[in-house]
Image (tube, helix red, strand yellow):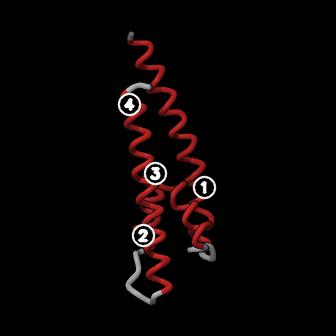
């Protein structure tokens, strides 16, 4: 794998772990009736590439599954980021192969 592919994988891993952790923390805070993480922040991490982690946390913790905004946007972003990451991953490998 090229350095760009490693960086892309690392970015997606970190942002998805962050999104998963934020959704988990928000669920925990909701159960304890504590201060919550803003919905804007949760959606922003999904938009930034953490949609798969957000979706996994939504399903695992049954969190934000009644809010239409999350039920529609997060799975859609998951699909968009999957396609985008695949294209970027393949292009990063091809461009470096063609240079050598």
Asked if residue 50 lies left or right of residue 76, the reply is left
Mark 1 falls on what kind of element? helix
Q: Position of residue 30 (x, y in %)?
A: 48, 83
Give the distance between the C-alpha atoms of the residues marked 2 and 3, in whole angstroms. Answer: 15 Å
Please state which of the two labelled residues, at mark 2 or mark 3, is closer to the viewer: 3
Q: Residue at x 62, y 64 (%)?
A: 72
Q: Which mark is residue 48?
A: none
Q: Quadrant of residue 63?
A: bottom right
Q: Residue at x 54, y 65 (%)?
A: 57
Q: Is residue 15 above or below residue 1?
A: below
Q: Which mark is residue 4?
A: 4
Q: Is residue 8 above or below residue 95?
A: below
Looking at marks 2 and 3 on the same chain, the residue that comes earlier in the sequence is marked by 2
Mark 3 falls on what kind of element? helix
Q: Residue at x 60, y 55 (%)?
A: 76
Q: Give the labeled residue for mark 3.
A: 49
Circles 4 and 1 in contact, beta carbons < 8 Å: no
Looking at marks 4 and 1 on the same chain, the residue that comes earlier in the sequence is marked by 4
Q: Give the labeled residue for mark 2.
A: 40
């Amino acid at each position: 794998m090229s350095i760009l592919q490693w960086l892309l994988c690392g970015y997606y891993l970190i942002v998805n772990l962050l999104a998963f952790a934020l959704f988990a923390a928000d669920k925990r805070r909701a159960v304890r009736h504590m201060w919550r993480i803003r919905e804007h922040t949760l959606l922003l991490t999904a938009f930034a590439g953490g949609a798969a982690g957000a979706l996994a946390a939504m399903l695992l913790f049954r969190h934000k599954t009644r809010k239409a905004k999350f039920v529609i946007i997060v799975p859609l972003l998951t699909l968009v980021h999957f396609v985008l990451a695949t294209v970027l991953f393949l292009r990063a490998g091809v461009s470096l192969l063609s240079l050598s």
